[in-house]
Amino acid sequence: MFIISHFLKALATVLDIALNLYMWLIIIRALLSWVNPDPFNPIVRFLYGVTEPVLARIRRVLPPLGGIDLSPLVAILGIIFLRQFLIPVLYDLAYALR
Protein backbone atom coordinates (compact mmCIF):
# COMPACT_ATOMS: atom_id res chain seq x y z
CA MET A 1 0.00 0.00 0.00
CA PHE A 2 2.97 2.29 0.59
CA ILE A 3 3.85 2.28 -3.11
CA ILE A 4 0.26 3.04 -4.15
CA SER A 5 0.18 5.94 -1.70
CA HIS A 6 3.29 7.50 -3.23
CA PHE A 7 1.97 6.84 -6.73
CA LEU A 8 -1.28 8.66 -5.94
CA LYS A 9 0.59 11.62 -4.44
CA ALA A 10 2.82 11.85 -7.50
CA LEU A 11 -0.19 11.51 -9.81
CA ALA A 12 -2.00 14.29 -7.97
CA THR A 13 1.02 16.57 -8.21
CA VAL A 14 1.58 15.94 -11.92
CA LEU A 15 -2.13 16.33 -12.65
CA ASP A 16 -2.23 19.62 -10.73
CA ILE A 17 0.74 20.98 -12.71
CA ALA A 18 -0.76 19.80 -16.02
CA LEU A 19 -4.14 21.38 -15.26
CA ASN A 20 -2.47 24.64 -14.24
CA LEU A 21 -0.40 24.69 -17.43
CA TYR A 22 -3.45 23.94 -19.59
CA MET A 23 -5.39 26.72 -17.90
CA TRP A 24 -2.63 29.19 -18.78
CA LEU A 25 -2.60 27.95 -22.37
CA ILE A 26 -6.33 28.65 -22.60
CA ILE A 27 -5.86 32.12 -21.08
CA ILE A 28 -3.08 32.94 -23.53
CA ARG A 29 -5.19 31.71 -26.43
CA ALA A 30 -8.12 33.86 -25.31
CA LEU A 31 -5.90 36.91 -25.02
CA LEU A 32 -4.39 36.24 -28.45
CA SER A 33 -7.85 36.07 -29.99
CA TRP A 34 -8.35 39.75 -29.10
CA VAL A 35 -5.37 40.87 -31.20
CA ASN A 36 -5.97 38.64 -34.24
CA PRO A 37 -2.52 37.00 -34.49
CA ASP A 38 -0.91 35.53 -37.60
CA PRO A 39 -2.52 32.06 -38.02
CA PHE A 40 0.69 30.69 -39.58
CA ASN A 41 2.83 31.53 -36.56
CA PRO A 42 4.04 28.24 -35.01
CA ILE A 43 3.24 29.37 -31.47
CA VAL A 44 -0.30 30.37 -32.43
CA ARG A 45 -0.79 27.08 -34.29
CA PHE A 46 0.46 25.16 -31.24
CA LEU A 47 -1.91 27.02 -28.90
CA TYR A 48 -4.88 26.45 -31.18
CA GLY A 49 -3.95 22.81 -31.76
CA VAL A 50 -3.66 22.07 -28.05
CA THR A 51 -6.73 23.96 -26.83
CA GLU A 52 -9.18 23.55 -29.72
CA PRO A 53 -10.24 19.93 -28.96
CA VAL A 54 -11.52 20.91 -25.50
CA LEU A 55 -12.96 24.27 -26.51
CA ALA A 56 -14.74 22.79 -29.55
CA ARG A 57 -16.52 20.24 -27.36
CA ILE A 58 -17.66 22.98 -25.01
CA ARG A 59 -18.87 25.11 -27.94
CA ARG A 60 -21.04 22.22 -29.17
CA VAL A 61 -22.84 22.16 -25.80
CA LEU A 62 -23.08 25.92 -25.16
CA PRO A 63 -25.72 27.86 -27.05
CA PRO A 64 -24.36 30.72 -29.20
CA LEU A 65 -24.48 34.04 -27.38
CA GLY A 66 -24.32 36.62 -30.14
CA GLY A 67 -20.68 36.23 -31.10
CA ILE A 68 -19.28 35.95 -27.59
CA ASP A 69 -17.28 32.76 -27.07
CA LEU A 70 -17.63 31.63 -23.47
CA SER A 71 -15.94 28.29 -24.02
CA PRO A 72 -12.57 29.45 -22.54
CA LEU A 73 -14.36 30.66 -19.41
CA VAL A 74 -16.24 27.37 -19.04
CA ALA A 75 -13.02 25.40 -19.60
CA ILE A 76 -11.18 27.46 -16.98
CA LEU A 77 -14.02 26.97 -14.49
CA GLY A 78 -13.88 23.22 -15.18
CA ILE A 79 -10.14 23.19 -14.57
CA ILE A 80 -10.56 25.14 -11.33
CA PHE A 81 -13.21 22.64 -10.22
CA LEU A 82 -10.91 19.71 -10.96
CA ARG A 83 -8.02 21.37 -9.14
CA GLN A 84 -10.21 22.11 -6.10
CA PHE A 85 -11.98 18.73 -5.99
CA LEU A 86 -9.98 15.97 -7.69
CA ILE A 87 -6.49 16.89 -6.53
CA PRO A 88 -7.38 17.03 -2.80
CA VAL A 89 -9.30 13.76 -3.12
CA LEU A 90 -6.23 12.07 -4.60
CA TYR A 91 -4.03 13.48 -1.82
CA ASP A 92 -6.51 12.34 0.85
CA LEU A 93 -6.72 8.89 -0.70
CA ALA A 94 -2.93 8.66 -0.76
CA TYR A 95 -2.78 9.70 2.88
CA ALA A 96 -5.45 7.14 3.83
CA LEU A 97 -3.48 4.34 2.17
CA ARG A 98 -0.35 5.01 4.22
Image (cartoon, rainbow, N blue to C red):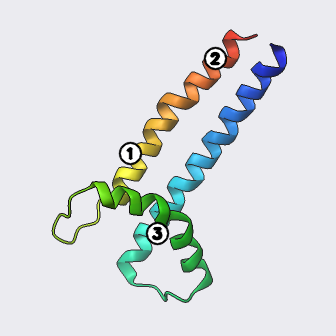
Furthest-left residue in view?
66
Q: Which mark is residue 93?
A: 2
Q: Residue at x 57, y 47 (%)?
A: 19
Using the rendered view, name the quadrant where residue 36 is placed.
bottom left
Q: Earlier in the sequence, mark 1 or mark 2?
A: 1
Q: Quadrant of the C terminus?
A: top right
Q: Quadrant of the N terminus?
A: top right
Residue kind at label 2, given as amino acid type = Leu
Mark 3–mark 1 distance (CA, rounded to whole Å)? 16 Å
Q: Residue 9 in the image: x percent, y percent?
A: 72, 27
Q: Earlier in the sequence, mark 3 or mark 1?
A: 3
Q: Which mark is residue 51?
A: none
Question: In this picture, is 24 found above or below 35?
Answer: above
Question: In this picture, is 21 found above or below 11?
Answer: below
Q: How many marks?
A: 3
Q: Residues within 10 Å of mark 2 (few under 14, many from 20)?
A: some
Q: Residue 80 in the image: x percent, y percent?
A: 45, 41
Q: Residue at x 40, y 63 (%)?
A: 56
Disc 1 secondary structure class: helix
Residue kind at label 1, given as amino acid type = Leu
Q: Which mark is residue 77?
A: 1
Q: Residue 70 in the image: x percent, y percent?
A: 29, 59
Q: Which mark is residue 29?
A: 3
Residue kind at label 3, given as amino acid type = Arg
Q: Residue at x 41, y 67 (%)?
A: 30
Q: Residues within 10 Å of mark 1 (few under 14, many from 20)?
A: few
In this rendering, would 45 be left or right of 4? left
